[in-house]
Structures are given as structure tokens and as C-alpha cells.
Amino acid sequence: MDETVDEQYDVVIVGGGVAGLSAALTLGRARRSVLVVDAGAPRNAPAGHVHNYLGREGMPPGGLLAAGRAEVTGYGGQVVSGTVTSAQFLNGQDNAGGFRVGLAGGRAAGARRLLVTTGLVDELPDVPGVAELWGRAILHCPYCHGWEVRDQAIGVLATNPIGVHQALLFRHWSADVTVFAHTAPAPSRDACEQLAARGIRLVNGEVAALEVTDGRLTGVRLRSGEVVPRQAVVVMPRFHARADVLAALGLKPTEQRVDGHVIGSYVQADPTGATSVPGVWVAGNVADPGAGVVNCAAAGLNTAAAINADLIAEDTRRAVTAHRYRSEPLSAEAERNVRDRAQGDRRQ
């Protein structure tokens, strides 16, 4: 074991959400040594339940993670609470010697492969009331929350052209949808026609705040002072990849754009989760901001299988090299050295 690390693992996983735990479970079952470092800040913590996860429908997010941690440790994986402060190449320039992962508190772990599943951060519109009710009455995904707000009075707080698309989506769950133009560009003639055809009201002017009574959303207040009663409001956050730990390894997030509008960032990877840096992999929302919980779990499984295949290939190369060395005849000088060492051992 390298002197600069406390313990060596086949894979260190940074992030203990669904993607990270799914990968750890797969790797544990593949008889790999795995360490999961969990900072304890899951993105979906404000939400009450997980949806669209077959067999886990309606389960609290914390309960799903607790079950996942138990399954991982049941196959020999280690899950620790903490923050990763650094990640670097052990030999200083590439991954030939693996990685050194530093944790808050001074501990360091060595890894042959590094998997980052740190997810993303939702940057919410700067409107009073949005952050307070995020994940409850303030939503962004109809597949995550549409059923829960069906037939309610829904507002869409438009901050970019995607607001029209969101309104058309949520119109399927409720006939009472209002778009608040807020800071978004004026919708096109075609967009206005689509809204009108679906009976969606368009309200111009900026939103000043959300009206909250006894912890419940009751309306949207415009700067003009008008209050439009609403029971739920749809927003479009910016999805920023949590990728600071990758910067020292030469990886930076890429902007994600929709119709020329920046909606967030992600870490580029191939379909298996492999990044442009050999030995470094990503899975879940850090690589795919639009992925739901079940998608992140699947990504963890797929990436873990690819990592294991990569490790097997490396193990095989090393075995072939050792086999060739053992099979080659020794030179006269090598034979003398072996004989001299053997004689010295017998004299001791």
C-alpha cells in the first residue's frame, strides 16, 4: 500500500446518492473493494417521496438511501460520512499509479479507479418564497410531481423560453395553468397561439414574491400588486454540476444549452460514464442533469460494470506480463544472483 494513503481500494466513489450506491452495490457483488464517501446533502432531500421507481414508488428519499447503504455494506462495501477535499494522481501526472483521495479530517484513500456521483445543485429563481417551498409547492418536473398537483391551480414562473414548454406539459395534469412572463423573453406568436389553444393564461410583468399562508402557497404577487391565487408554482432552476473535486484532475463542467439558453452544466462522459481522463468516471446527475432517480440508479449499475471490465483488463495485462517473465529463461547473471541469494538464506 502506498505510504501516502491510509487504505487502498479498487474504486473510491465520491457521492453517496442513488447513482453512487447503485455503483457500489454492483462493484461489491463483483468482489471489488469499494469506499463510498457521502457528504450527506442529497439534492432531493426537500421532496417527500420518490416517484417512478418501480417497486419503490412513494418511498421517502432518505429511506431509499438508508436501504441502499445497508445493501452496499452487506456485500463488503464501506460507506463513510464526510467530504472529499482533494483528488490527485498518485504519481503526480497520470493515473498509472491510481489516485489519492483526501477527506476532511486528514484521512486519505488510494483508488485504482475514481467514480464521481456528486450530482448537481439547483440554482433557483431569486424570488421570495421559492427556496422556502422548494420540493413541496415549488416544482419543476411534471413526472416527479404532476400527479400530486393534478387539478390544482398551477403557475409557471418563466425565466427563459422553456417556461412555455413547462406550461404545456403541466396542462396535461390540470386545466388551470397560468404562465407568469416574469423575466423570460416575450413568447413567439406560435407560442402564444399554443398557450391560447390550450386555455393557458399568460400574465405579463415581473413577479415580486410568492404569497404564503401558514406554510402553504396561496398565490403569486406581481410587482403591480396584483395577486393571482395559485396552489403550486413551476420553476426552471439552473442545474450546476457538483464537480469541484474533478478540477485538479483536469476536468471541468460543460455548459448545457437548450435553444441557445444556458440551463446548467454537466461533466462530459461517454455512454459508460468514462471521462476524458483515464481512470475517472462519472454517473448520475453530475453527468446527466435531466436524469430521474431510477435513471441515476441505472447509470450507477452501467458505469460500475464498465469500471469492473476496465479493472479486469488491467489485471489481465499485469498477469500476462508476469506470466511472460516467469516463462522466459534466466540469463547466466540472473541465475548466479538467484543461487547466491539462496546460499545466503541457507547460511542464516
Image (tube, rainbow, N blue to C red):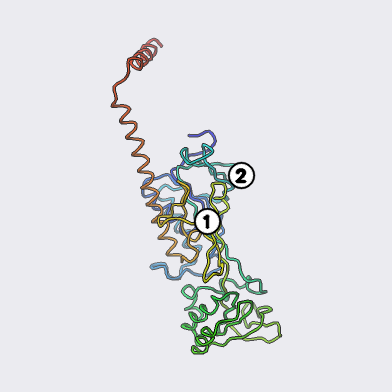
What is the CA distance from the residue labelled 1 to the residue labelled 2? 19 Å
Of 99 and 163, nearer the camera is: 163
Q: Classify residue 344 by image quadrant.
A: top left
Do labels 1 and 2 touch, CB within 8 Å?
no
Instruction: Answer with mark 1 or mark 2, whichever residue precedes in sequence.
Output: 2
Q: Is residue 76 above or below residue 320?
A: below
Which amino acid lies under the numbered mark 1 shown in the image of this protein? Thr
The outermost residue toward the top is 347
Residue identified by numbered label 1: 118
Badge 1: residue crowd in 10 Å (few <14, some 14–19, many ≥20):
many
Which disc number belongs to residue 53?
none
Q: Position of residue 37 (x, y in %)?
A: 52, 50
Q: Position of residue 57 (x, y in %)?
A: 43, 70
Residue depicted at 36% across the width and 35% down the height = 318
Q: Is residue 218 left or right of residue 75?
A: right
Residue identified by numbered label 2: 105
Q: Quadrant of the C terminus?
A: top left
Q: Classify residue 314 by image quadrant.
A: top left
